[in-house]
Structures are given as structure tokens and as C-alpha cells.
Image (tube, coloured by chain):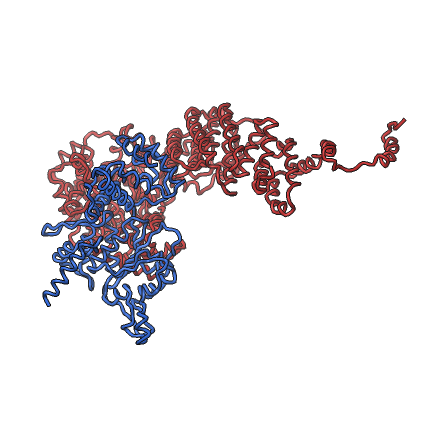
Amino acid sequence: MTIHVFGIRHHGPGCARSLRAALLKLEPDILLIEGPPDAQDMLPFIQNPAMKPPVALLIYAPDQPAKAVYYPFTDYSPEWQALKYAHSANVPARFIDLPQAIQLAQVTHEEQDKEEPLAGSEGETESNPTNSDVLTLPQSGQSEEEQQIQLHDDPLSLLAQAAGYTDHELWWERQIEQRQDMVGFFESILEAMTELRINRPPKDEHEAQREASMRQNIRVAQREGFQRIAVVCGAWHAPVLVDPGPDKADAELLHGLKRIKVASTWIPWTNSRLAYRSGYGAGVEAPGWYAHLWSVKDRNAIRWITKAARLLRKNDLDASSASVIEAVRLSEALSAMRDLTQPGLAEHNEAIQTVLCHGDSAPMDLIRTKMEIGEKLGQVPQDVPAVPLQHDLEQLQRRLRLKPSAEHKQLELDLREKNERARSQLLHRLHLLGIPWGEIMPVRNKKGTFWEYWQLQWKVEFSLTIIEANIWGNTIETATTAYLNDAASKQPELPQLTHLLKGALLAELPVAIAQLLKEIQKRATITADVRHLMDALPPLAQIARYSDVRQTRAEDILPIIDGLFERSLIGLPGACASLDDEAAAGMLTSIDHVMESIQLLDLAEQRTHWNRTLRRIAESENIHGLVRGHCCRLLLDQQALNNDEIQNLINLALASAVPTAQAAAWIEGILHGNGVRILHQDNLWLALDRWQSELAADTFTALLPILRRAFANFQPPERRQMGEKVKRLHQPASQRITGASGQGPILHPAHADLVLPLLAQIMGVSYGN
Amino acid sequence: MTTAKNIEHTDTTSLEQAVLRRHAEQQYAEELAELAKHDTRQRPPNWQLSPWAVRTYLMGGTLKNGFVITPKYVGNARLIEIAVATLATDRALLLYGVPGTAKSWVSEHLAAAIMGDSTLLIQGTAGTDENAIRYGWNYARLLVEGPSEAALVVSPMMNAMQEGKIARIEELTRIPSEVQDTLITILSEKTLPIPELNTEAQAHKGFNVIATANNRDKGVNELSSALMRRFNTVILPLPDSIDEEIQIVDQRVTSLGRALELPAEKPALEEIRRVVTIFRELRSGLTIDGKTRLKSPSGTLSTAEAISVINSGLAMAGYYGDGILNASDLAASLTGAILKDPVQDRVVWLEYLQTVVKDREGWKDLYRSFNEVL
């Protein structure tokens, strides 16, 4: 009877390849794998053809779905290969780690809270040397103490340093994963690790328990009479499993540990999640590259660079075959200069950037996302146990009495009711997670902001989305929060952030809201673009205004609004200077946004400041006519100008000294908005009329498109009213004009007298005498 | 014969001492010789040093016998490795980047280390014509003898081809496009036809081209993609960290100061740090502590300019001051380096003075001196 221990690194293609070869040679009669025994029942799913890596084993406490651990597997995970082998050779495979039922029981609530919802992984990874979280390059400035800590967490760096590498990942990559010669591979890993673990006991009690548990399980297999036992575990644990010895100490260590109830299932995983380092310890930096190394047997340099060239071509970047040849040559020359046996990812990247991208680093982002990470979503069979997120959703659906159905259904929610608000909250949250079960409809026939109309329809593909969304968290709330936090950290621009915030508020996610507000404030202080600040205002104002219905805290938002508003006020006049037509039109929208927010909040002080700024803009000369005109208009609408002031502004804007194009733009600006309100500004129409009649014929033709555009946005009835207005414009005033200028129609009293009697007769009045 | 040679030798050395700036291979002759002595690794055809030794020459290091090689390029060693590997694979190298990122400097030292000769130089200007890249004619001879080898005026490029050396082209993008195209045949066919003589000049092993170009200038001639494809492009970045930049400035100021024989003391590191800080802050539009946003002036504010600011400050201190570099010596040249546009840059600079320099601890002297100059 023999025990063969294979020390591996999780997700190492080199390890996986060697392991498969070693297993084929050894033909063990049982495989013991470092993994959670809780998930033993899940192993048969591996042979299901619908199972497509990357996938992850999820182990969670059903009553507290937030307590969970993920064990990701992909094609080139040595564990996955071991399981595959066990299935094909028809030998039993067992997980032998300390059960998660015990490990999760040890996780206190505090720890759980501290952790990000994504990062529930203490099981496999925490004490593993090959994938520790503390992947920091040793820096010269580090204190001795820091180094000590790091070595304890990361013993491999000792070996790497001995070999002259600063980055132990790189060392492992070069020495282990890219190795061609497989002879004595696991023996040497074992030897190195044994050397490292002399005088180095398990890091803490937790690790001691895990190793004890693995030894115990090996003993069980021994007792059952298996002859060739293969043990697959993280390299760090290998030395202590070689010879289990007497079981007394281990049994004591494991005696009486508290357990909780756990459930497990398979969920699809993604490549980018494999690369996600901070949360999940076993992150691999370039899963796409590893997959490439795994799937390609020979000439991987040529294939990789050719793939990159094809990708660049697809994105309309030049990449000729001749350049590919040169890139391969450069990459090989580089590896020779660096004394490597063959080029690694770094060499390839440098060669691609230098030759194919002409030194430009921008296309390298494309290569990073499309090839190095290589977005790929795994698949799991339909019949795996439901994911915790699904459970949580079902629970909520039952509690809120919202049954999923494939038919269209209308739902009318009164947000003042607690239960109905919870329903709205759920629908909003699902929306954020990309599950548009309900579509919100405009509210009709009802007054008040506390009404919401939804149209519900459950679609089958939602269940798939739920499984995918489980990556973000195990309850709807944590998943949405995690998703929003992630999205917030990726959004560089303010308007998108406020948009997210709006979603978060509707979905009532306090943690995400706090995070988003923080991000918004951070972004606002460094945003150079005033328009972004202005565009961010309306959603915030909406939230502050309607906060009473949703019971979100307006006091959190108002300071942010104030900050944004003040910055906008300071920046606006400067930002209005020297705009071209297009930028001016954009500025118009942003100004309207601020106006909208002010109307919503209706704070007297804000309004005063705002109107002062508007007036400043309206009165300054060197600002685009469109913007000036519109500022006038906004002031008019608020009745912030008296008649003289209006007349004055109009005269200035339409004076003959003003370039006609600017004057026309001004007209467009002042007309922009509601048509009815402008209808009664007689002085405006008069000035407009005068200005137009003074235009030279060809200038008028040139300006016609702008003028036409200015009126184009009005409704036909509005336009008709305006036309009639203009027609009648001169009637009440015509006499004055006639009197003043003497150019009116000439009256012939003698002729008129002839008509008058007849007229009197028709109208039934007496004439003359 | 021997005496004649000796005289010639002493002549050149005294001549060398009199020149303002010696070629890299002369200035660092000792380092190159030591490197060659200890270089046991494989050398590409006609190379004076192996690629590994070339890297050591540029990045600095200590040889087995304890001889110290000074670093010529401070920055990412990987870039230099790419450059050397490019030349070793027989591809032309294009060093690209904003002004003042040591492109010409790296090009010169690469040529010096690889060939021991950095003088085969073509300076690209708007007036560079084909003759500068191919060959010209000695017209007197041409008229007398007709086309002949003797009447040919060989360009540095042709020279490099025939001797298997490295030709350098400075400011490639300033050369008119139609002249740039001449390079395409040279780089791909490695031959230069001379139809007048019905012959051609074929490149010998070791021939290669290092070109430099900057991507900040306006009114330059963009490289055609056909030409671009024949170069491996390495973009030299501005220094990453402030300490790196300070080291570069310090090193260059010291060596230049020696060459110019300035009567001033070597500047205190602190003074260099202040200048570099100002340059970096204005360049990135952000204070070093990352708290305040700043406007950036129109100039590049490269490391090279920082070096020249300190140098002229040293000259001021040496000739008109007390021999020690201080704020007032720096003020004039620093202001001049930053105010490239009299209107816009002035606003930027004033804002910077008021919001950053004024309140920064220990910068009072700078603030006063700057205000005197403005």
C-alpha cells in the first residue's frame, strides 16, 4: 500500500498537465483531493456534458446565504483534471479537507460583515502558499518585521528569492508552469516544500485542523484497504500528508468542533472572476493565457501572437503577417536576453506592443481583456441544486405574494403601504441585477409621487441570469449591493454615477447608496467638466425631493447637491465662454438640468443665486447667443425680470451691431422651451419683428434655417397661435406706428363716407343724423 | 612611422579634450573596453558587445572585477531589453516619445555600445533630401569624369550599410514624407541601388537603423504605415517616480557641469527636488500629494528642460551669485521654461504660485524670487 502526494498550485496548467500524466502512469485506486467533503454529492455532476468550466462549487449556509465559500474550477485546474481522471478511470474520488460545515461555523459574524460579499472564500485559499492574498513585491523600503510576516504568509517567496526572482508568481510560472520536462516534477515540488516546512508548523490553529482532517481522511482510505492512494493538495500541505502516522493527536484536534448546516451547488464562473485577485485568493492573473497554454500543445508563441494579430485586425487595426513574424522573433530574442527557455506572457506582450501596436499601449487593453482574461462564462447543468440567490428570491416572492408568471400582468403599487413598497424594492433590485421582471410604466390617472405602475412578465432566461448573478452574492440585497459597488468603481463619469445612484435609491440599498454618494463626492471634486456636475443634479434633486416616500435620508444628499450646485455656479460663466454651436446646444441641456433641479427642490436661496448667475450670463457679451438667450428665457419664466429689463436685454441682443448669426442663435435660445409662456411677451415679438424686417434679403435667407429650427420644436397649435399673434401684432399698435412714422395706409375720407351709410344699415345703427 | 602615429594620437586626444561634447564611445571608452574584456557571451555578427553587455552598459552594473558601469538610462530596464533585442533580430528601432525623454541619448549610447561608433548620424529636418539618406555627387568630379565611384558622396546611411554599422536618424518625422520613403527599400531589401553606376550598395551584416521621433510636435510628417511597419517602436515614457527623475537630473547636471566647467558648486539635491517637483506637478496637473488639481501649461516640461533650468541656474550662481545655487538663481530660467505662451501659461503659473508655492513649507524663498521675476 502506498500514498502518493501530488503538491500542486490551483489553476496551474503546467501542474494540471503533469498531474494528468502522473495519474495515468500511477493508476491509483482512489483519489483524495483537497476540497470540501460537504460537496461530495456534487461530484457526479462533473460528468454531465452540460457542465462547462469555468464553474465553481458553492457551499453556503442555507439559513444565512451570505455565509458562503466558492471553489472555482477551470479546465486547467489540477483538481478538475484529477476529478475527470477519476471519472474516466472509474475510481472513487473524495474531498478530504476540513468540512465547510465546520469552517463556516468558525467564521464569526463580524468577519463575515467585514468581507466583501464577493469574497467569501476562506476555505480553499486562505492558508495556501501558492495563492496568498498578500501578493506584494518585496520592496527595498520594507521593514524587517513586514518581511517576516510576508514570509510566513508566503513561504514560496523564499524559494523565489533564492532563485533571484522578486516576484514569486513569476518564479513559479517560469519554473513550474512552463516547464517542458515532466520527469521528477512532483518529487521536486515535494522536496522543496519539505525543506520549507522544516521548523515551520501550520500557520494557525485553523490550518492545523485542516491538515489534521486531511490526514484523518487518508487514514480512512488506508483502513478501507485501498492500495495506491493518490492525494492531490496544495503544494504547501504536501509534506505533512506523506506519512499520516498515528491518528491520536489529529483526532483530538478535530474533536468536538462546532458544525452548522450547509448546502452546496455548482454555479457558473467567469474568467474575469478567476482573475479577480483581491477577493478571491486563488486568482490567476491571466486566465486566458493559461487556457491557451493548456489547450495548445506546441508553438504556443506563434499561436498566441497570431491570435493577437487577428484580434487587432478584427478591431480595424493593422496587423500584417509579416509583423507577426517579426513579433515572434522579437519575443524569442527577448526571452533569450532574459535567459528564459521560452517566452512568457510578458515577452509576448512586449513584442506585440512594440511590433504590432507600434509602441502604443492603448490596443494592449484590448488584448488584456479579450485574450489574457478572455471573457468566458461557464455553464452548469439544469438539474444542479438551486443557488442560494434563487432560494432567497423564492422566499421573497412568497412573502410578498408576487408569483412569477410568463403572462403580462399589471401591477399598481402604492408606496405608502409597507408591503407594496417592499414589492417595488424587489422589482427595482432585480432590475439592477439585469433581471427585468417588471418594467416600470408612466403613471396615469393618479396624482401623487407615491404611485408606481409595473408591467410584469417572467421569462425563462431569468433563472439563468439568477444563477449568473449569484456570483455577486447569495441574497438579492447583497448581490445588488455588490453589483452596484463594482459598477460604481468602474464608472468614470459623474452622470453615470448619479444614474446608478438613482437606481440604488429606488432599490433601497443603504450600503450601495453610501458607497455611491462617496464616489460621487470624490468624482465631483476632481471633475473638471462643469456640465457633468450640472447633469448630475436632477436625479439627486429628485431623490431629495421625494425622499419622504422612500424614506431615504435627504440630509445625506442635500450637502452633496449643495456642493455640486456651488461648483456649477462658479464654473458656469467660464464654461459658457467661447462655445461652438454644438457645445452651446449641450450647455443648454445642462442649464435646463440645473433649472429642473432647482424647480424640484424649490429652495429660495438656491434660486436667488442661480438667477444671479443666469443674469450674469444673459448680460455678458462674449457668450454664445443660444446660451444667453436661453438664460433670458429662464429668467422670464420665473418672472425675475421687470419689463424694462426685458426690453433692455432684447434690445441689446437684437441690436443692429450684433452679428446676425448670434442674434438668430439668441432667438433660438429664448424660444427654447414651452411655447405658450412666450406667447404673451409682446415686447419680444415686436423686437423680433423689427429685427427681422431690418434684415437684408440674403442675410434673411441665410438665417432662415436657424429661425426655422427655433420654431420647429413647438407643437403645431402653438405654432399657429404664434403665427396669429404675429399677424395681429401690429393691429393695436398700428395707429401709433402710423402716427409716428406716417407710413400707414393713406385714408380717403371722401371714399369712406360713401360706404358708411350702408354699413350702418347692415349693423342696425343710425348714421349721421 | 611610429612617431607620426603618436603625434596623430596626441593630436586627437587634445582635440577631444577641446570639444564641447565628446561622443559617447569616447567619453565612456573605458567602460566599453572593460565590458568587452569580460563579455564572454555570444555576439551577433559585427557587434562589439553581446546584447547582455549592451544592456549592462545602458542600465549600469558592476562587472566581475568590481569595475562599475554607470547607468546611462534611468528607467525601465525592460524597454532597453526590447530595444536591444530588436536590434539583435535585425529590425530597425524607432524610439518614440515626448521631447526630453532621452530618445537621442539612448540612440547614441546604443550605437556606441553595439558598434563602438555613434557618428553615422543623419539629422532629420524639413530640408533633408534624398541625398542625405542615399548618396550625393561631387559635381566637379562628375562633370570631369562622368559618373564614377570616386564622384559619389556617400551618406552616413550608405556608409553604415557598407561597413555593417548602425546608422542613426534623428527626428525622423521632420523629414518630408517622400524622402522618408527612401528608407523603405533600405530597411526591407537592405540594399541601396545606384542606377547611375549600374550597381548597388548592399548592407553588410550588423547594419541597422535607429531612428528617433517625437509625438508632441505639430507640423511633422506622420510616418506612412509601410515605413512604420519596418520599425519596432519603443515609446520612452516620462520618468515614473519623482526619485527616478531627480536621479536623472542630478546625474546629467553633474556631468554637464563638469563639461562646462561652471564655477558653481554641485547643486544640493533639495534644490533639484524642488525644481523636479514643480515640473512634475505642472505636467500632471496634480500636486504631489494628490490633493489639489492644477492647470497644465502648454509646454512639455520634460526632464531635459528641468536639467537645462538647473544648469542655467548654476551658471547664474557661478558667475553672478555666491557660487551656491539658490532660489533667485533658478527663478528666471524656471519662469522662462514654464511660460511658453505669454497669456495662458501666465495664468497657470500665477495660479500655481498662489495656490501651491505660497503655502508650501520651506518654499517662501522660491515664492519671493518668482514674484520678483514676474
Q: Quadrant of the C terminus of chain A?
A: top right
- Residue at screen point 12% across, 65% down: B4
The image quarter containing residue A750 is top right
Residue at the outermost front position: B320
The picture quadrant where one finds residue A124 is top left
Please tell me which residue lies in front, A108 or A395: A108
Tell me where residue A543 appears, x and y as whole percent. Answer: 46, 29
> Which residue occupies the foreground of this view, A767 or A340?
A767
Where, by quadrant of the figure, is residue A660 drawn?
top right
As drawn, which residue projects farthest toward the bottom? B145
Which hue belongs to chain A? Answer: red
On the image, the x and y values in percent for residue A191 come to 13, 46
Position in image of residue A185 (x %, y %):
17, 51
Residue closest to the eye, A219 or A745:
A745
Tell me if A426 is positioned left or right of B58 in this view: right
**Residue A176 in view, yes or no:** no
Q: Which of B363 and A461 lies nearest the eye of the viewer?
A: B363
Q: Could one spot residue A636 in this view of the protein? A: yes
Q: Position of residue A501 (x, y in %)?
A: 43, 33
Q: Which chain, by letter, is blue?
A: B
Q: How many marks?
A: 0
Q: Is residue A416 left or right of residue A696?
A: left
B162 versus A95 height, above or below: below
Q: On the picture, is B106 further left or further right than A561?
A: left
